[in-house]
Amino acid sequence: MGLSSVNWSQIQHVLLDMDGTVLDLAFDNHFWREVVPQRYAAQHGVSVEAARAELEPHFTQLRGRLEWYCLDHWSGITRLDLAAIKREVRHDIRLLSGSLDFLEAVRRSGKTLWLVTNAHVDSWVVKLDQTGLRHHFDAVICSHDFAAPKEQAEFWRRFVATHPFDPATALFVDDSLPVLRAARAFGIGCTIGVRCPDSRLPRPDLDELMAEFHAVDGLKDLLPIA
């Protein structure tokens, strides 16, 4: 599907993922791959390498589950105040290039604009406050409020039950393949993947993403909104 296939006249609702779509995933990748192991190592008196080895099985087991995104869960495992640490390093949070232009264009268009995120409340609040983006969205849809991550059909059913809309008239942009698949299966009319969610690292599953979905480098590639 080319960009000309996005028929804006049929889109009434714009649903955007946060990390890796609106915001640069480089922050989260650095936080979980560097900051958390370093703080864990200092807290528990082990090397950073040993900290990574201890934490990796937990990451692997929980991928795709709601706990994967829950700061409270990870704080319990690491015995670190991860919400406080995230606030401490919040100055490294960045928008992906073109995100602000896209958000402003959607607002001017009059279409509903929702942030749809798996991020824990202690994470998305810090990020939206730091970037000043909260007022751009009509609502923040958080999977923790529905007790199911975006990867699961139950999230989408509960989402629509709480915020009624016609999925066929919605555009959804996300960087996660499992999430995009779940949105498509639910009947979201237009699902688009992000090729470059992290400005510093290439995504390892790019070929798979592009084989299944129309993909753009970032939200700026979806402009103009006709």
Image: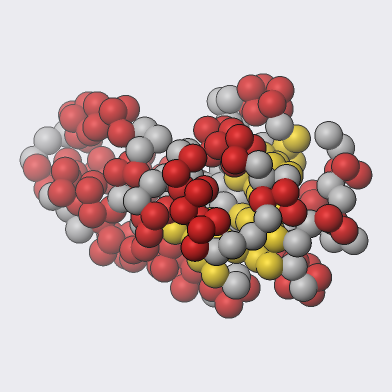
Q: Quadrant of the N terminus?
A: top right
Asked if residue 40 lies left or right of residue 104, the reply is left
- Extreme-bottom residue of the structure: 135
Q: Does 171 appear above or below 122?
A: above
What is the x, y in percent for residue 121? 37, 63
Any part of residue 145 in sight? yes
What is the x, y in percent for residue 125? 41, 68
Residue in front for this viewpoint, 189 or 222: 189
What is the x, y in percent for residue 13? 70, 60
Residue that appears at 41% across and 67% down: 126
Residue that appears at 71% across and 23% down: 211
Residue that appears at 58% across and 25% down: 205
Residue in front for this viewpoint, 7 or 96: 7
Q: How many marks?
A: 0
Asked if residue 49 lies left or right of residue 214, the reply is left
- Extreme-left residue of the structure: 45
Asked if residue 222 lies left or right of residue 74, the reply is right
Q: Quadrant of the C terminus?
A: bottom right
Q: Quadrant of residue 90?
A: bottom left
Q: Quadrant of residue 97?
A: bottom right
Residue that appears at 35% across and 51% down: 147
Any part of residue 39 in sight? no
What is the x, y in percent for residue 50? 18, 29
Asked if residue 91 lies left or right of residue 21, the reply is left
Residue in front for this viewpoint, 212 or 98: 212
